[in-house]
Amino acid sequence: MTDRYAVFGNPIGHSKSPRIHALFAAQTGQDISYQAILADKHGFAAAVDTFIAASTGLARGANVTVPFKEEAFRLAVQRTSRAEAAGAVNTLSFEAGRIIGDNTDGAGLVRDLKHNLGCDPAGRRILLLGAGGAARGVILPLLLEGPAKLMIANRTEETAARLALEFARLPGCAVGVKPEGAGFPQLAGCAFDLVINATSAGLSGAALPLPAGTYAPRCVAYEMLYGRETAFMTHARAAGARVADGMGMLVEQAAEAFFVWRGIRPHTAPVLAALKEK
Ligand code: ATR
């Protein structure tokens, strides 16, 4: 009896998740199937219902990607604290007729930084660019690593300020640093050890107006997008930073979801290598 999983999104044709989970399953000897499902923009909940009904009791979970992560948050009857903080759900578990929501994006980023890139956020001055859903999802996991500073900078300054205040008030963040919010011009004179681009600027080819001196010596510049060289990556490299894209985060968030569902943590290095080879 093969347990069934799926990823829901729109669009979904580009998704690497079926391949990643097939590689995890083969590596760990788990008997699962994992398919990509294109849900109608207004039909996410119905698509999940259909998947569960068609799986005759074997649907165990699902991943959720753009644009359904907030809707998945609302669909879940129970949510983990990291999903609550993210305000979005990328991992659903179907347990005895109940839908449980989790968010593995932030854990995936932190794991990629620490284990694949040798860049422990602890004690670092971190600059997080962007204040949308992608940024929100990684704030709590980064804060829990104990950075020296977490600055959230956004084109629309008020959004960054609001987001920073929200997380500064979270009970889980009572110890350690409080995030700060800023617009890009306010970054002048500040240097960072880790700069994470969570804006969608790379999708349109836009550059970010970061002041000179943003990148401290030996800084790591992390682009959450993958599969393309963005202006952020090009500029960071030119400024002397070590640059990484979001492919590692993609694989690590999948591994975390696999762990949530199956209780087994797959080795990610061979899977990441296989994806990069392609
Ligand atoms: P996501 O879920 O990917 O975070 P989003 O919620 O639409 O998507 O947020 C997009 C983020 O990218 C925002 O922080 C946005 O800045 P604004 O709040 O000012 O809109 C940022 N962004 C998008 N295009 C940008 C650009 N060309 N320059 C700078 N920031 C950009």
Image (cartoon, helix red, strand yellow):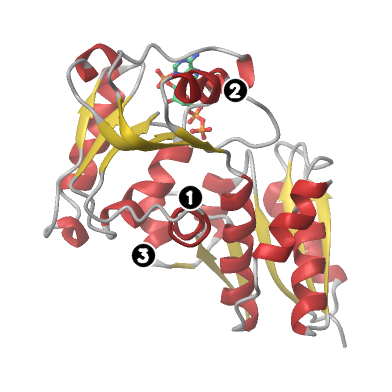
Mark 3 / mark 1, whichever is N-terminal = 3
Whole-number angstrom distance, CA of label 2 to CA of label 1: 25 Å
Where does the image place residue 15, in percent across and percent down from the top left?
Answer: 77, 46
Whole-number angstrom distance, CA of label 3 to CA of label 1: 11 Å
> Crowding at label 2, few (<14), some or many (≥20) Cα neighbours within 10 Å?
many
| Amino acid under disc 2 | Thr
Element type at mark 2: loop
Element type at mark 3: helix
Residue nearer the viewer, 110 or 132? 110
Residue nearer the viewer, 96 or 86? 86
Q: Is residue 3 above or below residue 137?
A: below
Whole-number angstrom distance, CA of label 2 to CA of label 3: 32 Å
| Amino acid under disc 1 | Ala
> Crowding at label 1, few (<14), some or many (≥20) Cα neighbours within 10 Å?
many
Q: Which quadrant would the N terminus be assigned to in this image?
A: bottom right
Residue 127: tell me if it is visible. no
* Residue carrying label 3: 81
Residue 236: tell me if it is visible. yes
Q: Nearer the viewer, mark 2 or mark 3?
A: 2
Q: Nearer the viewer, mark 2 or mark 1?
A: 2
* Residue carrying label 2: 230
Mark 2 / mark 1, whichever is N-terminal = 1
* Residue carrying label 1: 88
- Circle 2/circle 1 CB separation < 8 Å: no
Q: Is mark 1 within 8 Å of ligand 1?
A: no
| Amino acid under disc 3 | Ser
Residue nearer the viewer, 94 or 165? 165
